[in-house]
Image: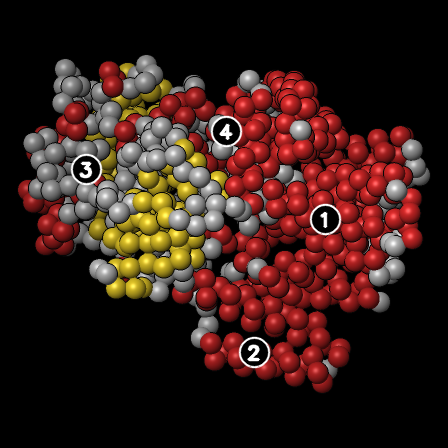
Amino acid sequence: MAQLSAIKLAAGLLAGVLLVQWWPQLPPRWCIGLLLSVAALLAWRCPHWRWLACVMFGIVWAVWRGGLAMEARLPRALEGRDFAVTGTMVDLPLARTDASRFTLRVGHALLDGQPIDLHGRITVSWYDGAPALQPCTRWHLLLRLKRPRGLLDPGGADSERSALERGIVATGYVRDDPDNVPLAGSRWCVDGIRDAVARGIAARVRDRHDAALLQAFSVGDTRGLTQHDWAVARANGVSHLIAISGFHVGVAAVFGVWLALLAYALWPRLGLWLPRPQAQAAAALLVAGMYSALAGFGLPTVRTLLMIAVVALARCSRRGSSGAQSLALAMIAILLVDPLAVLAAGFWLSFVGVGFLMLCLQAHGRGLRAFLHELSAGQLVMTVSLLPLTLWFFGQASLVGALSNLIAVPLVSFVIVPCALLGMLMLGLCPPLATPVLWLAARMAHAQWWLLEHMATWPGAHWYLPEVQPHALLLALLGALWLFLPRGVPLRWFGLLLFLPLLWPPLRMPAAGAFQVWVLDVGQGLSVLLRTSDHALVYDAGARYPSGFDLGEAVVLPSIHALGIDRLDVLMISHGDNDHAGGAEAVANAFPQARRYAGEPARMRMPMQQCVAGQSWQWDGVRFRVLSPARGEGDRDNDSSCVLLVEGRGGRLLLPGDISSKVEPQVAAALGPGPRPFMLVPHHGSKTSSGAAFIAAVQPPLALVSAGWRNRFGHPKPEVLARYAAAGVPVFNTAVQGAIPLDFPVNAPPRRLRGWRRRQPRYWRE
């Protein structure tokens, strides 16, 4: 009965918390007070409706905490101002060649010499002359701040949701100021110990990559891993093993049990003061807690730690506790401490994965054979059951993940992690003895990673599906549950049918003569994705920054996959500026068969053909014409931009790149007769483009701007917007709308659809 009550309580609380996360805005507080009163009345007077009271309490709690988190953000009116901030560095600072990045917990802040109510965490970049930064240190810094705001595209990550879940109240960068100095204060904290362990590993392991793997396995320090490493991990479905997983915490708890056994073997008289079972439970909880702290208290580690705590407390109080009850109590604890944890992918992957293992795996005796059966069956259960959630959160899955995990899980969890734990212990007790232990762990990690890199090239390692719809996600989860029900349940294979909406979703493809367009949200840059019934084109691919962050990889490719496009026919890069061409290499590597055109091939990092006025082709009744540059004009910077005109039966689209007013007259003359084209505003709305004569000649029904939010160039310029307004042309900006879809059907006029920021409104989005 107690177990059933805990599960019902956890399910009701989760349902209420989750419901709030779908709301476009939070209700006023008086509504929450009324709902809390109703929930208390139901719980008191109507025992049979207590599950509903739990749901209501979950709503109240999530609204309250979500409202506090949103109110803690930097006020909109103060964005772009300089603040004198005193705070403490938390987590592990990341030093790169272009900048150092860290998280600062604000102690107090001043604006124009006056205190301001700003508390919480801010993410900071220090670009020029950043000193060596250490965790736990206190600093006084002059920071230029703004509210958390991210890019919103099909299949892309929601960084504003992530900021809310992590408690980030502002983002910014360090301004040059003589008062940017460290302050006196305690330098001891858990993150300092993590950093010391990471440095100890780096000093004893020669191979930097092997050291980076051991740092990730030991203390959750992933600073040394590259984008390639994470791509290999995703291709093998082992990302949960790279940063410390919940299973590793379980291994640490077993290590604690062994320490207790050793202590009682050496000093049997300890049993006179404390019974051995209770001592083992306490030791398991203590070691697991210390290891979770060293891991940075990630969500999977916290979930496992709470489950161990439930079991340990039950053992110490001589009461029984089932796995389902422990999982339910762990979920209740996490939701009560932080209801916004449901916004993290780790919350769902952790609890759903463990829940499926508990429901679907049955005991098959003891011994090695039973262990191997549960290990292999467990990987199959995890791979199939977490497939829907993996596609929902990340847009991709790995078909070789079951085999990769079958190899990696026992090697990492039972060999590498124990060696790493022993090495960490030796670092504190006897540093010379740590070297051979860490060397052994590094060699095993090296061999394992060599195998994973080869498996990452196998067919099916990277498997993409169109963007998952909520109903398809729920049906697939239900299908996985049905598929792994105990033997004897009839028609278990019918569970596979419930995966069909996930695996073969309906796609609305353009008819012959029609085309669809997405002006992607890539910040201060440009990328346009265009699709006809059987072909696809990418025009520009966003920027690639010195930090390694590549918008071609982070935005363009996920959008292509989320929209169900599995082949790219043409990659056209208007000109060589980074904000247009930086992401081109990632797109070209993903689709090597695509034809490549560029306005400035000499500035590209890969071979590309020169686009020349007069080039044309036709796909599925849609005509493509290059209007500029003329032959021999591929060395004029912005004015060498490939200007592309797309003409379907229902309308036209003009993509002018970054041309200036010098080239606009010849582009307008080359348009020829036809319907007035929708148009991308040249050069993001720079004052050197969009002349009044050009706007009057083109007469676009609407214009689109691709620009970054509060970008340093001030694009689009107010005078440019005024010229479009004077001509009666509405202008829509990706910085405000997110990715903007356009539809050019055959038997209807072209239209602009709702931008991604308006299509899926959530209370945490700006």
Q: Amino acid at mark 1?
A: Leu
Q: Position of residue 660 (x, y in %)?
A: 12, 34
Q: Which residue is mark 2?
A: 35
Query: Which residue lies under the disc numbered 1?
Result: 286
Q: On residue 224, which mark appears?
A: 4
| Distance in Å between CA atoms under marks 2 and 1 | 40 Å
Q: Position of residue 682 (x, y in %)?
A: 18, 38
Earlier in the chain: of badge 3 and badge 1, it is: 1
Rounded to the nearest angstrom, the CA distance separating label 3 from label 1 is: 59 Å
Query: Residue 97: x, y in percent?
Result: 36, 28
Q: Which callout, 2 or 1, points at the residue further toward the start of the chain?
A: 2
**Residue tagged 3:** 683
Instruction: Give the residue type at disc 4.
Output: Gly
Q: Position of residue 726 (x, y in %)?
A: 10, 54
Secondary structure category for the residue under label 2: helix
Q: Amino acid at mark 2?
A: Leu
